[in-house]
Amino acid sequence: MQEADHKEIGRKLKLFSFSKKVPGTCYWWPKGALLFDSIVSDLKKELKEQGYLDLKTAPIIDLDTLKASGHYDNFREKLFFTGNENEMKKNKVNWCLKPMSCPGSVKIFNEEMRSYRDLPIKFSEMGTVFRYEQPGEVNGLLRTRVITQDDAHIYCLTDQIEPELLKLIDFVQKTYKRYGFDEIRVELSTRPEKSIGSDEQWQKAEAGLVKALKDAGIKYKENKGEGAFYGPKIDFHIKDSMGRSWQMGTIQLDFATAERLEANYIDKDGSKKHPVIIHRAILGSIERFIAVLLEHTAGALPFWLSPVQISILPIASRHLKYAQKIRDRIKDKEFRCEIDERDETLEKKIRDAEIQKIPYVLVVGDREIKEKNVTVRTRGQKGLRKQKIENFIKEIK
């Protein structure tokens, strides 16, 4: 299959554009913003059902926190330092745009005294993070400097690790299949040369991930020395329609960060202990996932995700009133429907709907008004069919 370019698809579908003056940034158009928000809303619905608590951490973080967590030493070259002009000139900058959300999540955890009875606590965030990628490294939505991560941090007890990991593995697999990615490859990455935490902590963390994968019946490839600096991780790779593999979600087990950032809970005996933190992202970067999804589908998104699901084409202006009645009935059922009111030929309107990859096109003219029906054209199928609007709505529900 010929490779598709998400940048070209995004332009044709009027989803987004990019800034030449600020490489690595994206401007989301109305249809693109709708696509973006639909993916986020779908995830948030599932997160709510699983007991996650949604956060919004500040976009600016102090360097002292990043130094304490270990992120400063490991991400310094990726940081966007911030301050006023005078501070920048004097090199007295103490803040940066956050490169990840976990230190902010821990700050919120630390705001209240926690009991072992409260755990696990699941904090989720659609966090916007900022990373200075080199100009030659940025590539459309695949690699950006402004990233939206479907981030979450699970604060748990040691005996809660495995059940939480098994839930996450199941969550990841179901999510990918919902978007049409059935082939999933799993990799386990172990302690890198540059890391924080003790040997015992790393051994526990790696053993925990291995056990969860085995109990889930998942085969995996081991990548020695490729883990995060604070803990080992499971990475999930999906295969697209062109046979390419993409790393997406990740689950990381962390015994070190809570200690470094003084996150505690009160245990049964009244003593203070540090929770284990499970870092996880299902899609990873929302921007990157959209790029992969667009190339995987060549822009023909699933019906539930399409920014415009149904386009109504009145043959002439006298058919507009009937088209509006049809649109209103469809919108009452909460489908995304629009009318192409342009003074163009029917052939031109149909062709444009094909380019826009709209799942259903409804043609209305004199005959449809007389027979009180619509002529339906389905994306990817040849031919037209007559259908009563109530039957059409039942079909797409």
Image (spheres, rainbow, N blue to C red):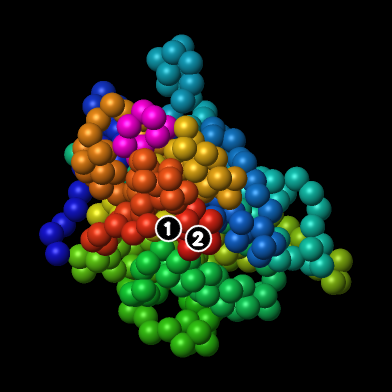
Marks 2 and 1 sit apart, C-alpha to C-alpha, by 7 Å
Q: How many marks can you see?
A: 2
Q: Secondary structure at mark 1?
A: strand
Tell me the residue at 43%/43% (across/down).
369
Q: Which residue is mark 1?
A: 387
Is residue 205 or residue 178 the one in the foreground? 178
Label 2 sits on a secondary structure element that is: helix
**Residue 148, above or below 215:** above
Q: Where, by quadrant of the figure, is residue 223 drawn? A: bottom left
Magenta includes 318?
A: yes
Q: Do the CB atoms of the residues marked 2 and 1 lie less than 8 Å apart?
A: yes
Residue 318 shows up from this direction: yes
The residue located at (49%, 53%) in the rendering is 389
Is residue 282 rendered magenta in the image? no
At 29% across and 57% down in the image, what residue appears? 384
**195 w.r.t. 222: above or below:** above
User: Would you name the residue on which mark 2 appears?
Assistant: 391
Going by the numbered disc 2, the residue's amino acid type is Asn
**Residue 86: horizontal and vertical position, in percent?**
46, 11
Camera-side residue of 133 and 387: 387
Which residues, given as a range, are shown in magenta? 313-320
User: What type is the residue that disc 1 sits on?
Assistant: Gln
Viewer-closest of 136 and 171: 171
Task: Quarter of the image for the N terminus: give it.
Answer: bottom left
User: Measured from the top left, where is residue 160 in percent x and y?
Assistant: 67, 75
